[in-house]
Each structure stands twice: as structure tokens, then as C-alpha cells.
Amino acid sequence: MNSKFFNTSTFGLILLLLVFVSCLNEDKTEDPYKRLTKEVKAIDDYLTTMGITPIKDVSGVRMVITQLGTGLPATVKSKINIDYVGKLFSTGATFDQGNVNDVLEKYIDGWKIAFTTLPAGSKATLYIPSGYGYGNRDNSSIPANSILQFDVNFKDVEETTAELNRLKEDTLAIDDYITDKGIENVVIDDSGLRYTINQEGTGSSPFWYTKVKIKYTIKLLTDDTKVVATVEREPSTEFASRVIDYIHGLKIGLQKMEEGGKATFYIPSGLGFGTVGASDGASLVVPANANLIVDLELIDIVE
């Protein structure tokens, strides 16, 4: 459904928006980084003036969550079910609304960023700089260099039969490994994740958007004698190091821990690096469909 109607509550809000975006419409060929910086500032200034605190992604995408879901976010390969209303940030005019039930990778980059960092079941308003939307080209009723605003109901991530079958096979393999190795005090999570807490923490537990400092090693379930990767991460300007920024297995697992704690996670491939795997430069470190063993230390909750 496509519609063109003005959807702004007050004249004062219209003037406020016009002030924030007027400086953005000077040159369609402006340097993309400078434009992004201006647009993010316009979004942030507007939200600050309205007294709204958003979830900030390092990309510049902003999310204002009105209902936080409990499901896992999508991956770019996931099939998503979302009701949406798309508006122009500059005027509040609606340019499109409806439902999508398709693979996320088909949609704009702003959606890929948002729906891979928003739990399924959430309702939110997304603010997307033009570079993650339609850029410097006109698109139907969307002018070039338009900041986009979407009111979304992220209803579900739909798993395929192949994904469900893979999860069943992976969890059986993990359970067999745990039994064969005689590992005790294993916690079984409904997601398919299995884990042991090896050292109790003394601090608080992180949540979806908590920034953390962590250290972990990765082994393959099929060869637990070799560490294939050692990782240390903490927040930086390039990587927020939020719980939600990690693979699904760690998104779930980190929220089971306390600051200062140590744990071992047995992660089915679909909660790890999936059908793609992971590489370190030119070398494939984690092959496709690999179940993982991750030994992790939650060093610090940064904020």
C-alpha cells in the first residue's frame, strides 16, 4: 500500500523538524560521510529536544523501542514478519505502509542494521540516515537524501524446516558430546544452547544493549583440542560491544552470566556462524554448520 498523507501532530513539531533537516538539502553530491554526520546530528538533536532516549547504533541508525521483545533478532538471511509505516523524517508524511514477510537481505541497509539488533516481538520507531535508505536518488515518493522513519511491529523471525532440522541434529550432537565427556552441571536452554558456569560472578547481569568487555576462545565441537580463535572485545568507536552485537549463542549466554563470571557455552551452528562460517582474513576459521565450544570470561560491564 502506498499513500501520501501528512501525519504530523502539531505545527510546532513541523517547524522543529524543518529546522533540523533544512541544512541537509543543499547538495545531492555532498560527501557521504559529511552528510551522514549531519543527518545523525539532526536525528539526535530532534530526539533530545523531544526528551527521547534512543538505542544508538555505531552506524548512525537510531531505534526508539516502545515494546521490547523476547525473541532473537534476525540475521540478514532470516525471513522476517513485520508490520510497518514508513514516513519522511523531514515532514512526517507517510510514504508507505503494510506488512513484509520475506528475507531481510532484500531490504534497505537500515533495516538490516535495525532488525539484526532488535529482538523479535519488539515494537519500535527506527530513524535511518539516507545513506542506509535510498541515498542520493529519488525513489517514488521518497526524495533523494531523505532520512527515513519507520514505525514497526517486529512480529516474528520465521525459521525454515531446514533450520529446525539442523538445530535438532546439532543439539543431539552437543548432548552426545556432553554425555561422552562426562560434563556435569550443564544447563539446558530451550534455544538449544547448553552451558556450564565455571566461575560465579559478583556483579550484575548484562542485557541486550549492555556494553561489555569480554574475552573468549572458540573450539569446534568436532575437535576440542584446538583453539581456532581467541577474541578480546570491548566498546570502541567502531564496535559497541553490546550483548546484542554478538552471535546468537552469546546473546543468550551473556545474559545468563554475572560480571566477573566465567562460562563454557556449547553452541549449535544456527546460534553460531550458521551456513556461512567465519574467517580470519583469508583463512576459514569456523566452517559452515559448525557447532562451537566457547570458553568466555565476562570481564566488565562497561555501561
Image (tube, rainbow, N blue to C red):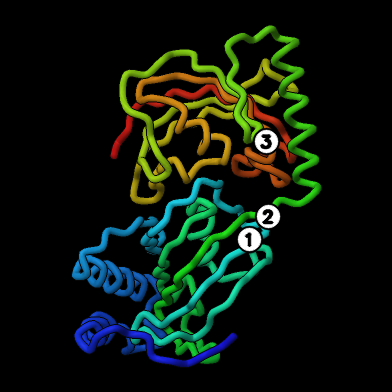
Label located before the other in sequence (1 or 2): 1
The residue depicted at 45 percent of the width and 72 percent of the height is 150
The residue that disc 1 covers is 80
Amino acid bearing label 2: Glu
Judge left or right: residue 51 versus residue 64: left
Amino acid bearing label 1: Ile
Q: Quadrant of the image for the N terminus?
A: bottom right
- 3D distance between C-alphas at marks 3 and 1: 26 Å
SS at badge 3: strand
SS at badge 1: strand
The residue depicted at 50 percent of the width and 87 percent of the height is 137
User: CB atoms at circles 1 and 2 under 8 Å apart?
Assistant: yes
The residue that disc 3 covers is 286
The residue depicted at 48 percent of the width and 78 percent of the height is 86
| Position in image of residue 214 (x %, y %) | 41, 30
The residue that disc 2 covers is 158
Q: Nearer the viewer, mark 2 or mark 3?
A: 2
Local packing at callout 3 (Cα closer than 10 Å; few below 14, some 14-19, many 20+) is many
